């Protein structure tokens, strides 16, 4: 098998493409989790639900 | 000011997340630039270093979700805690099973000539992903808290039964997909490939634990807010 290309497309498109896709999904999910945690904690604090725990 | 007992684990897992991301980048660097090409597939086999660790992580998180679901059913006074853990694990299971399908497809095109085939391994992996999606939809559309916990736990346990089917599908049926690489009687991967693959598995799994903890903290905060508001 010719390892340098597949049809007219280089192997780099598939290999780097795979890593880029995985990285993008992981980064987006991490930021989504961080944002959800931050906004829920912010709301808990603003609405005074964390007051008792500070005492 | 957010209390210290809440701030401390948040800070701890933020730091661990950064460390594990760096480890993951090192793993990918080794896979892309330090390991030689394969004799049969050339360079395109490098997808294995991301595809296989992600598949193993998907299996693990589906299993953990079922385990936490089972505990949520059995331990009544801790069911809230275990239900949140089961939910967070299932989200990761769905994310990783989706990425398995995408990375597998990107590997399939240059090696098999097709993006998708209704092969037993691919089809059972798709079913696993759809079961995870079903779990998340069911949670979203079940307003009663008690019912949601029970139904979610049952679906999580049922989903985990599909994991061994996915894993052994390449042995049980005639499959286009290659058999397991590291369980055959004679080694079929060189030691450097095995090392980099194992390293990538460990770092991807560590990274997934950090993501799980952050998502678990987020789910905890969101549900605590909803409960506090009544």
Image (spheres, grey):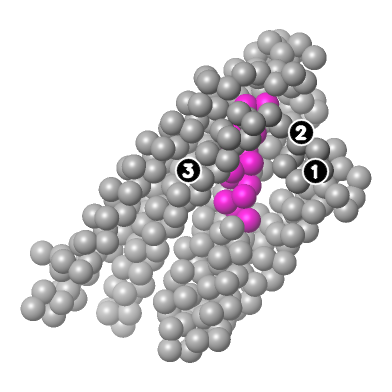
Magenta stretch: helix, strand or loop mostly: helix
Secondary structure found at label 3: helix
- Asked if residue B65 is positioned above or below residue B32 in the image, the reply reads below
Chain at tag 3: B
Pick the residue in front: B182 or B151.
B182
Crowding at dot 1, Cα within 10 Å, few <14 / some 14-19 / many 20+, comes out as: few
Q: Position of residue B143 (x, y in %)?
A: 49, 78
In the picture of the structure, the residue carrying the numbered disc 2 is B188
Residue at the image point whose x is 68% and y is 37% from the top? B104
In the picture of the structure, the residue carrying the numbered disc 1 is B184
Q: Position of residue B46 (x, y in %)?
A: 62, 27
Q: Are both tags, 3 and 1, on one chain?
A: yes
In the picture of the structure, the residue carrying the numbered disc 3 is B203
Secondary structure found at label 2: loop
Pick the residue in front: B37 or B118.
B37
Give the side of residue B47 with respect to residue B182, left or right. Answer: left
Q: Residue furthest bottom?
A: B76
Range of residues picked out in magenta: B45-59
């Amino acid at each position: 098998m010719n390892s340098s290309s597949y049809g007219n497309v280089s192997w780099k498109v598939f290999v780097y493409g795979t890593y880029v896709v995985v990285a993008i999904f992981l980064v987006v999910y991490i930021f989504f989790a961080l944002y959800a945690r931050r906004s829920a904690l912010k709301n808990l604090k603003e609405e005074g639900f964390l007051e008792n725990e500070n005492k | 000011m957010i209390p210290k007992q809440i701030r401390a684990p948040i800070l701890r897992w933020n730091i661990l997340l950064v460390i594990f991301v760096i480890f993951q980048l090192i793993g990918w660097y080794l896979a892309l630039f330090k390991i030689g090409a394969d004799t049969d597939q050339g360079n395109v086999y490098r997808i294995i270093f991301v595809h296989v660790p992600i598949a193993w992580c998907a299996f693990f998180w589906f299993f953990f979700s079922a385990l936490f679901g089972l505990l949520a059913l059995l331990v009544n006074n801790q069911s809230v805690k275990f239900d949140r853990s089961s939910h967070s694990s299932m989200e990761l299971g769905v994310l990783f099973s989706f990425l398995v399908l995408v990375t597998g497809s990107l590997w399939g095109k240059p090696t098999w000539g097709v993006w998708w085939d209704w092969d037993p391994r691919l089809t059972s992996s798709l079913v696993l992903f759809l079961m995870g999606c079903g779990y998340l939809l069911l949670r979203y559309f079940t307003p009663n808290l008690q019912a949601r916990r029970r139904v979610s736990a049952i679906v999580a346990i049922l989903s985990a039964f599909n994991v061994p089917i996915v894993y052994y599908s390449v042995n049980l049926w005639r499959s286009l997909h290659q058999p397991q690489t590291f369980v055959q009687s004679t080694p079929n991967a060189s030691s450097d490939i095995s090392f980099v693959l194992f390293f990538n598995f460990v770092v991807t799994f560590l990274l997934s634990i950090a993501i799980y903890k952050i998502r678990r903290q987020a789910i905890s905060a969101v549900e605590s807010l909803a409960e506090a508001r009544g």
